[in-house]
Structures are given as C-alpha cells and as structure tokens.
Image (cartoon, helix red, strand yellow):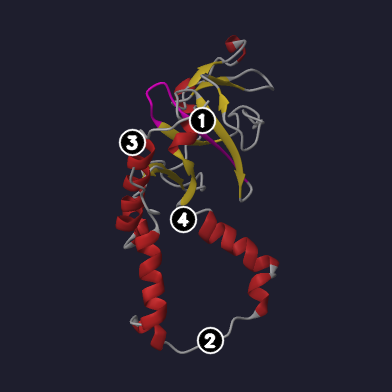
Amino acid sequence: MSTTGSPWRPLFERLLDELDGQKSPDWQAAKIALDPKVYYDGKRFQAEREQLFRRLPLCLGHIDQLAEPGAVLALDLCGTPVLLGRGADGEVRVFLNVCRHRGARLVTQQAEVCRRHRLVCPYHGWTYRLDRSLAGVPRGEAFPDLNPHLLGLWQLPSSVRHGLIWAVLDPAADAGPLDVEAYLGELDPSMRSAWLTIAFTASTRFDAPATGN
C-alpha cells in the first residue's frame, strides 16, 4: 500500500527555499517599522473590515460541508449574517441570512450544518427556496402590491473553486460569479494541485490484508 504526502508540501518547500535563498527582489526593499496602533486602533479595525474583509473574496467553507441538496450553514462574519446553501439543482449559493420582510434570521443555528429544503422565517412565516426565490407569504391578500420576483433572498457574489466556497460579504456588490482564479493569482495552480491530491486520496480505496480475532 502506498501513501501520499501532504498536498501542501510543494508550496511549503517553495516557501522554505525562498527563505533560505532570498531570491525575490522584495528582500531588497527598505525595512519599515509598523506603528503598534495597527494592532489595536478601533478605526483601523473598522476600515479593514469594510475595505478588506467585506469587499474581497473570503473562503467560507468546503463544498463537502454542503454535500446534499437542502444542506445549509449559517455564519456571522464581520457583522454580516451569511447563509450558505445547496439548492435542489445542486448549486451552492451564498445569501444574507435575513428575511426580506422584517429582517429576522432565517436559520438561527450558527456554524452547524442543517437540513432545510425551504427557509421559513420564524417571525411571519415568509418562505424561501434555496435558489433565493420567494416561495410563499401567509395572508398574501394583505400585500396586494407585493411582487415576489423582487423579494427573493439577497444573494452575495460567490463561486466554488478547488473545492472551497468563496464569497464577497458586500450586499451591494454584483451578485454574479467571482473570478477567484484571478484573485488567487500565482497561488491558484498550487491550490489546484492540492485540491486534486485531496480529491484523489479521498476517493481512492486501498485494500490491505489484516488478521484479527
């Protein structure tokens, strides 16, 4: 039986080689000292949340966490209530975890994979499908001007790459697919190699003789 090394080993070896050889021109850059305030300044923290963590792609989880249609996962990230879900069509999407009526949380269990083929608001019972569409409103006659096509869940820009779920937390951003390949740049091929190795190892069966009582 053969064993497979860590899929991250080539990346770590490149990093160690760079530390030993210092071949990059970045090593010749002038040394700078960081102001200690970067670690505790509240205004800087808010700026980093708004300009970095809410506007750049973040890795939210692995697709295996949402293995079956109807699997959902609620997370609070940088003050944003996020909901990951795999729809009946098999697509993984990322939404804001809020009802469009009064803003109540649709899934209250945090960081726990749950099964929901539909999302029902606990406040007034508005119901959503996992393709973001509004499925039903109790006492719909009380909302004669309601257009269900305009009141689906807020969907965040997201994409799946190398087995990882990526999304931008800014609700005002275009909800189209993310170009994660461009965002990762030179790191993308290494992550692809690691993902292929992990996928092969997880899907390969090894038989070995064993004795026992």
Q: CA distance from mark 4 to mark 1?
A: 21 Å
Q: CA distance from mark 3 to mark 2?
A: 49 Å
Q: Is residue 18 above or below residue 82?
A: below
Is there a contact, CB below 8 Å, between mark 1 and mark 2? Answer: no
Which residue is more in the foreground, 185 or 152? 185
Q: CA distance from mark 3 to mark 1?
A: 39 Å
Q: How many other residues sit within 10 Å of disc 4, few (<14), some (14-19) or many (≥20)?
A: some
Pick whichever of labels 4 and 1 is earlier in the sequence: 4
Amino acid type shown at disc 3: Thr
Task: Please provide percent x and percent y for residue 40.
Answer: 70, 70
* Residue at the (55%, 21%) spot, across then down: 116
Amino acid type shown at disc 1: Leu
| Label 2 vs label 4, nearer the camera | 2
Amino acid type shown at disc 2: Ile
Which residue is more in the foreground, 142 or 27? 27
Pick whichever of labels 4 and 3 is earlier in the sequence: 4
Q: Is residue 123 above or below residue 43?
A: above
| Label 4 vs label 3, nearer the camera | 3
The N terminus - image quarter: top left
**Residue assigned mark 2:** 32
Pick whichever of labels 3 and 1 is earlier in the sequence: 1
Is there a contact, CB below 8 Å, between mark 3 and mark 2? Answer: no
Q: CA distance from mark 4 to mark 3?
A: 35 Å
**Residue assigned mark 1:** 153
Disc marking residue 56: 4
* Residue at the (59%, 63%) spot, across then down: 47
Amino acid type shown at disc 4: Leu
**SS under mark 3:** loop
**SS under mark 1:** loop
